[in-house]
Image (tube, rainbow, N blue to C red):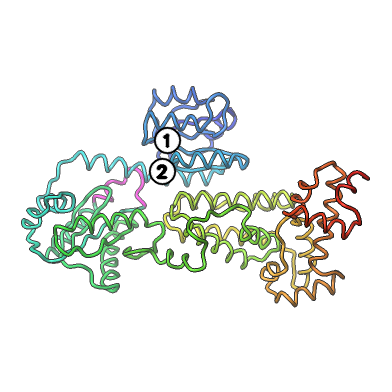
Amino acid sequence: MIKVLIVDDEPKLREGMRTLIPWEEEGYTVVATAANGYEALDKFRELDPGLVIADIRMPGMSGLELIAELRKENPGCHVLILSGYADFEYAKQAISYHIDGYLLKPVDEEELISYLQELREKISLEERINEWQALEPARTTEVLVRELLQSKEAGEAAAELGLGDSSCEVVLLELKGLNKGEDAREESVKGLMERHWQEQEERGFFFTLPPYMGILLKEPLRDERARAALWQELHYLISKEGLEFVAATGGAAVRPEEAGESFGAARARLEDAFFGQKNTLLCGMPDLWEESAQGAVEPEEELDPERDIEVQLLLAVEAGSSEVARELTLQIIRQLVHTQRDETYIKDQLLRIVSSTIARLEAASPELRPLIAGQASPMGEVYSSRYLHDAERLVSGYMEQLSRLTGSGSVRGDEIKRITDLIQRRYKENLKLGTLAEIFNYNSAYLGKMFKNQVGEHFNTYLDKVRIEKAKQLLTQGMKVYEVAEQVGYMNSDYFNAKFRKYVGVSPSAYRKEN
């Protein structure tokens, strides 16, 4: 059983988590709870738990400070953090400590269990690696292959393996889906692989270098057909134990002594497997990178929460345009990949986008809160996703669900009413007729005519009047002119002054004095 320490300053939450979760069924046991960071440190040192679940905000020692201390005590300890929406900046900092997951309060039981299952697999793998590293190599051929891949003096190993001066290639694979106590399944796969490649020795040698298994191919794979055939061969063997795997090729080594370079390339591709395609032998840069490079932002640019595309996503969700919301979500993800090709960064940004969209929807339309609460958040699954394609599917699907909720009562023909409602809620955003035309799938000029016919004013005029009315309310509350300008969507104070004079007849300053 994996020992668990629960840390939270709320007694009800500690007790609820301790009693409501079927810990033992998932391979865990709660050995202690703690009300603050200092108490947690004492119990951590005494009990050496494999998993700590901690609130990010606590009196005395915060969750962040506790995580930092835990890392000093045991760099390999596993941590899940608990947080509310308001603590996102703290959670973002916690992610830099390489936490294992992020749970929003109130804790969803199914989401926590999903994390526990994923962590159980990870901890089991770590234990097996430690066991393997403690064992002396038992097979002469495997020892020679390891020497060839890891030693600068690889020539002797290559000669003993009979490789001559011909080219070769390394293929690495990593098992997925192993649970606690399933070492036998992994050993079974290793046995199957070893026997298979002993029979295929004219093609290559099987070896293990934890956490990887691998094949040193005596002849490099020639093309995509050969790579697909090898993947199917590996899948046939590994699927007998019902396990999944990722595999990568390191490319051809011109001489056996250069096999270490092929090994390094294969390992790098496995580490980058999050961006790759499922059910393929990873080779070179994943296709997604090529796709994202087209029409994306420059690499040095950072996506800002207020970028137009994220505003467009919010508007599409509010307008009930599910297909547009899906496409905008995918576009944002590809820009994220181009900005920073890092799994943690992308998952972090997806959490921010989902959280921000929910918060802004609920702030503008409180009646949506129970409906949104009824939709399971995808973030637990996103954080445990092994592939970007799965994370894309989860987040874009969730945005589609939100869009259907907000647009459930809408019908074709009420677009102008929905647009005026959007203006009333989002007047401070950079609203453009062209953007709304795309969201509602209309030609921009045609939508402009529809708007003028039904509302009696042009789109920009109506938007300006709504903003000016809001500005008048804020000015009577004593706000400064430049603050009011920003609050109603005008980034330029002079432009705001001109608009205000046009519709009210006096300057904003004069209006504030008079009212």
Badge 1 amino acid: Leu
Query: Which residue carries the number 2 mark?
Result: 119
Q: Earlier in the sequence, mark 2 or mark 1?
A: 1
Q: How far from the left and from the top, in percent, is residue 93? A: 51, 39
Is 341 included in the stretch rendered in magenta?
no
Q: Mark 2 Cα within 10 Å, few/some/many (few <14, many 20+)?
A: many
Q: How far from the left and from the top, in percent, is residue 224? A: 30, 72
| Magenta stretch bounds | 177-187
Report the Cα–Cα distance between label 2 and label 1. Answer: 9 Å
Q: Is residue 214 left or right of residue 165?
A: right
Q: Identify the residue at the far front of this view.
A: 494
Asked if marks 2 and 1 touch (Cβ < 8 Å), the reply is yes
Q: Secondary structure at mark 2?
A: helix
Residue at (54%, 40%) from the top-left corner?
91
Query: Which residue carries the number 1 mark?
Result: 51
| Residue 288: quadrant of the picture | bottom left
- Tell me: residue 239, above or below residue 437: above
Quarter of the image with the N terminus in it: top left
Badge 2 amino acid: Leu
